[in-house]
Amino acid sequence: MNRKIKKQVLTVLAGSDLEEIRRELGKYDEHGLVNPLFSALLRPEEMLRWHTVTLFGEVVSRLAEKDMEAARIVMRRFLWSLNDESGGIGWGSPEAMAEAMVHHNRLCAEYLHMLISYMLPDGALEHQDGNYLELPELQRGLLWGIGRLAEKRAALLREKEVVPSLLTYLSSPDSAVRGLAARALGLLQAFPAVEELKRLSGDRGQVRVYQEGVVVLTTVTALAAEALARFENS
C-alpha cells in the first residue's frame, strides 16, 4: 500500500464535511483507493469509520462501472474478512457491502444473498445455508446494512423473505441490535412485526444510528415508535 496515499486518504476521511470528503476522494483513481479504505474501516474513530463506509460504497459502485471484476474482488474481500478462516473479524464489511449494493444494481443482484446469509443459522454440514454472525458488534453492522438497503430496495428484501430473520433480533440482549432490527422492519413496512414492535415500547436501551452523515443517539423505544409510525402512514 502506498503509505503516502493511505495517509492522505485517512486525513480526508477524518474531516467533518461529507461533501468535501467526496470531492477530495474523487480526485483519486478508484483502484488506488481500495486498500486505504480497507485500512480505514479498522480505525477506532467512529465518524472516520462511517465516512469510510459511505465512501467505500460509492467508490466500489464507480469501480464496478469501469471494471466489474475489480469490484467483485472487493466484494469478495469483504466476504473473506467475515470468514473465520481469514483470521480477522470483518469490522465494517457488512455496512460497506450494503452501501455498495445500494448504489449498484448488478452488485446487489450478485451479492445480496450473501449479506442475507449472515442472518441465517448454519444448517447441517451437508446442506449449510447460513453464515450467522455471532458477535453483537457485527450484528449491528449487518442490521444497519439491511436497514440501509431497505431505504432503496425494500421490495427486493421483502421478496427475499428477510422479515422472519429480522424478527428474531428484536429479542437480542444487545440494545443496538434490537433497535437496528426495529428500524429495518419499519423501513420494510413489515406488518408481521407490529405486535413485537409494540412490546418494545418501554425499552430504554440506547442505540447509536448513523444516517445522512451524522450519528444520532436514540433508544430502542424511539426506533420502534418510528417503525410503527411508518405502518400508520402507509
Image: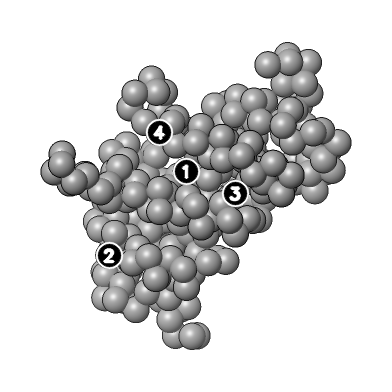
The tag on residue 82 is 4
Disc 1 versus disc 3: nearer the observer: 3
Residue nearer the viewer, 194 or 64: 64
Occupied quadrant, residue 27: top right
Which amino acid type is shown beneath numbered disc 2?
Pro
Give residue 87's position: percent from left, percent from top.
38, 20
Which amino acid type is shown beneath numbered disc 1?
Pro
The tag on residue 164 is 2
Comes first in the chain, label 1 or label 2: 1
Residue nearer the viewer, 37 or 61: 61
Question: Alpha carbon of mark 4 to alpha carbon of mark 3: how far?
Answer: 16 Å
Residue drawn at 72 percent across, 32 percent down: 31
Assign the N terminus to one quadrant of the image.
top right
Question: Alpha carbon of mark 2 to alpha carbon of mark 3: how far?
Answer: 24 Å
Q: In the picture provided, is 129 more to the left or to the right than 218? A: left
**Residue receiving disc 3:** 100
Disc 2 versus disc 3: nearer the observer: 3
Q: In the picture provided, is 28 more to the left or to the right than 152? A: right
Which amino acid type is shown beneath numbered disc 3?
Ala
Comes first in the chain, label 1 or label 3: 1
- Asked whether residue 11 appears in the rendered view, the answer is yes
**Label 1 element class:** helix
